[in-house]
Image (tube, rainbow, N blue to C red):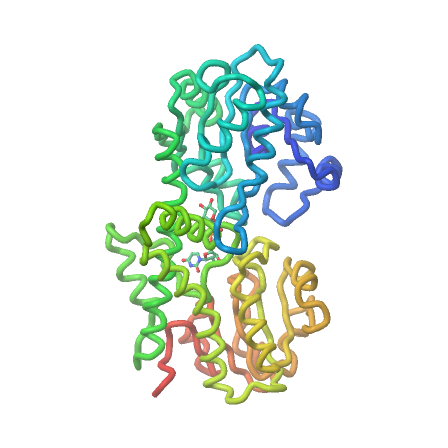
Amino acid sequence: MALVMAHKGFKVIGIDNDKEKCKIIMQKKIPFFEPKSEDLLNATLDKNLKITSSLNSAVSNSDIIFICVGTPNNPDGSVNLSFLKKVSLNIGKALRNMNRYPVIVVKSTAPPGTTNNIVKTEIERVSSKKAGIDFGLATNPEFMREGSAIDDMLFPHLIVIGTNDLETKKKLHELYETMYKDNIPSILSTTIINSELIKYTNNAFLATKISFINTIANICSKTPGADVEIIAKAIGKDPRIGPLFLNAGPGYGGSCFSKDVSGFLNFSKSLGYTPILLESTQLVNQMQPILIVDMVEKKLGNIKNKKISILGIAFKKNTDDIRESASLEIIRHLLKKQAILNVHDPQALDNLRKVFKNKLKYCKDIIDCLFDTVCCLVLTDWDEYKKLKPKDFKAYMKNPFVFDARRIFNPQKMNSIEYLAIGYKAQNY
Ligand code: UDX
C-alpha cells in the first residue's frame, strides 16, 4: 500500500518498530517475496517514500495515518488486539501536541467494534483529544491478495470507507479520487461498524466458497466418472455464483482466511449466536489435508518408508508465505506415517526449513525432488509445475504416480501415467 501510494505521487512515511526490517527495506530489499514490490521500492525510496522506526515524529508530520499492524489469533481462536492497542497508545502520544486535524485510518482486520472500543478509546485516553473534534477516525479494509498485492492496490474492485465523521469521509474520498484520477473505483461509504463487518464477511464468504467446492470435490472423488472441474466450470457460468474461487484444492491457507473466520466465529459466539455454517467452513478446511493423505494412502498402501515428492509448500503461488499452508499439515501427517519426503518450492524452502529442520530433503531442483519417489503430490499451483509432462515423471520417478491436489494438469494429457486429482477419479471403485 505504501509503495503504490508513493508511486502515485503521495509523500509516504513507512513506520515499523522492527528496526531490522526497516534496515532491509532502506537497503531497497523487500523482506519477503512479493512480485513487483522490489521494482516499486527502487522507484520510490528516498523520493516519495521514507522509512523510519520513530513513530512520534512521523505521525506528527502526517495528515492521514493508516494503522496496518497485525491482528493474529490467540491460541483459543480469539483475536490478539495488543498490537492495535499499543500502536493506538503511541499515536495518542504523538497527537498530544498536534494542532491539525489528522485522520487515523484502521486498515488492520479486527472484530467489529474494535475501532471504537480499542483504537478510539486508547487514542482519546492518551492524547486527551476527541474523535470527530480533534482528529478523524475511519476504517478502510484492504482486499489485497498476497502474490498480487501491488496489482490489487493499483486496480481495487472497491474501496470501503467506514466513518461516522463527514470531514474524515471527505478527506478519504479526496485521497482516493486523487490517487486513481481517471479510473476511480467504486467507493462505498458507510459506518465504522459496517465497514468492519464487510471485511469479515468478505473473507468468510470466500473461505466458505472454497470449502463448498472442496466438499463437492470430495463427493466427486467417490463418484465414478465425476470431475469437479467440469462441475465448477458449469456452476461458475451462473451469474449468481460466478467463476472465481471455485478451484478445489488442499484447503485454504495464508494469514487471513483461517484467522478471520475464527475471529468472526469468536465475535459471533460472544454475542450468543453460533454460526454453524462458518464452523463447517473451518472444519471442511481442517479435514482436507487429512483426506488428501488418505487418498494417497489408499493408492500406495502402507506408506511407511516410501519416498514421496512434494511440489509446492507456499499457501499459493507467487509468495514465500507458508502460514497456515495445507502443505504443512500434509507433511505432518505423512511424517507421522513415516514416509520419506523430498520437498520443492521455488520460494518457500527457507521458511519451511525453520519448521521441519532435518526431517525433510529440501530440493532446489524439481528433478532432484522427483528422483526415485513413488508418488508426487502437487500442493501449490506454481506456473513452473504446470510445464511438467508425463515423460518428466516417468524419467525420474521410481513409480510415476501423481496426485494433483491443485488441478494444474489436464487429466487427458496425463493418461500415460497413474494420475489422480482432487475431485477426479473415484477412489472406492
Ligand atoms: C485473502 C483475500 O483474498 C484478500 O482479499 C484479503 O485481503 C486477504 O486474504 P490471500 O490470503 O492473500 O488473500 O490469498 P487468496 O488468493 O485469497 O487465497 C487464499 C487461499 O485460498 C490460498 O491458499 C488459495 O490457494 C486458496 N484458494 C483460493 C483455493 O483453494 N481455491 C480457490 O478457488 C481460491
Q: Is residue 76 above or below residue 101?
A: below
- Taking the spot 68% from the left edge, 25% from the top edge, the residue there is 47
* Viewer-proximal residue among 371 and 258: 258
Q: Is residue 302 above or below residue 315?
A: below
Residue 135 as seen in the image, left or right of residue 16: left
- Taking the spot 61% from the left edge, 41% from the top edge, the residue there is 37
What is the quadrant of residue 222 in the picture? Answer: bottom left
Where is residue 166 shown, x and y percent of the image? 38, 17
* Viewer-proximal residue among 49 and 219: 219
- Residue 28 in sight in this render: no
Where is residue 279 shown, x and y percent of the image? 37, 59
Where is residue 249 shown, x and y percent of the image? 44, 65
- Taking the spot 42% from the left edge, 16% from the top edge, the residue there is 167
Quadrant assignment for the C terminus: bottom left
- Residue 197 in sight in this render: yes
Residue 98 as seen in the image, left or right of residue 416: right
Count of numbered tags: 0
Quadrant assignment for the N terminus: top right
Q: Is residue 224 above or below residue 58?
A: below
Where is residue 355 shown, x and y percent of the image? 66, 63
